[in-house]
Image (cartoon, rainbow, N blue to C red):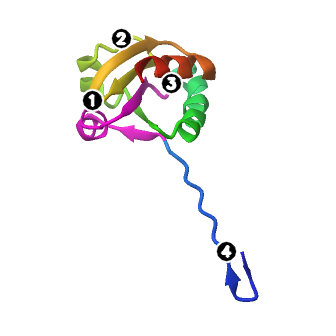
Amino acid sequence: MCVKFKCYYFYLIIMAVAHITNDSFQSEVADHKGTVLVDFYADWCGPCKATGPIIEALAEEMTDVKFVKVNVDENQQLAGKYSVFSIPTFMVFKDGKMVNQFVGARSKDGFQEEIKKAM
């Protein structure tokens, strides 16, 4: 907003949930120092659609955690590597190592509990 030549700028930092692929998994998750929640999902999956807004909200709130999504239909090699047989499957990585895995939709509090187990 500019008033009488005085400009005020407000910056809002929003942590977005990145969509990653077979090719970017190494740099985005395995090489990352810190905590990463990986959401293995599919566009046609009802529970995946239900958890999407929860993951987005957590990404904005839990700025010390990186949130990423992997579409299993487009990244079958990666889903196979991590034995993803049901979706949604969530994995929590700490400094590149998987430390927690869980399957199925959760409440916001449920996700926070699962993430905190890994921290």
> Which amino acid is tagged 1?
Gly
What residue is pinned by disc 2? 85
Q: Is residue 50 left or right of residue 96?
A: right
Residue drawn at x 25%, y 32% is 30
What residue is pinned by disc 3? 44
Q: Nearer the N terminus, badge 4 or badge 1?
A: 4
Residue drawn at x 63%, y 71% is 9
Q: Is residue 43 left or right of residue 6?
A: left
Q: Nearer the N terminus, badge 3 or badge 1?
A: 3
The local crowd at label 3, few if under 14, some if 14 to 19, many if 20 or more residues have their Cα within 10 Å, is few
What residue is pinned by disc 1? 96
Q: Nearer the viewer, residue 94 or 51?
A: 94
> Which amino acid is tagged 4?
Tyr
* Foreground label between 3 and 1: 1
* Foreground label between 2 and 3: 2
* Foreground label between 3 and 4: 4
Which of the 4 image quadrants contains residue 35?
top left
> Which amino acid is tagged 2?
Phe
Spot the residue most to the right: 3
Q: Real-space Cα distance between discs 4 and 1?
A: 40 Å
Q: Nearer the N terminus, badge 3 or badge 4?
A: 4
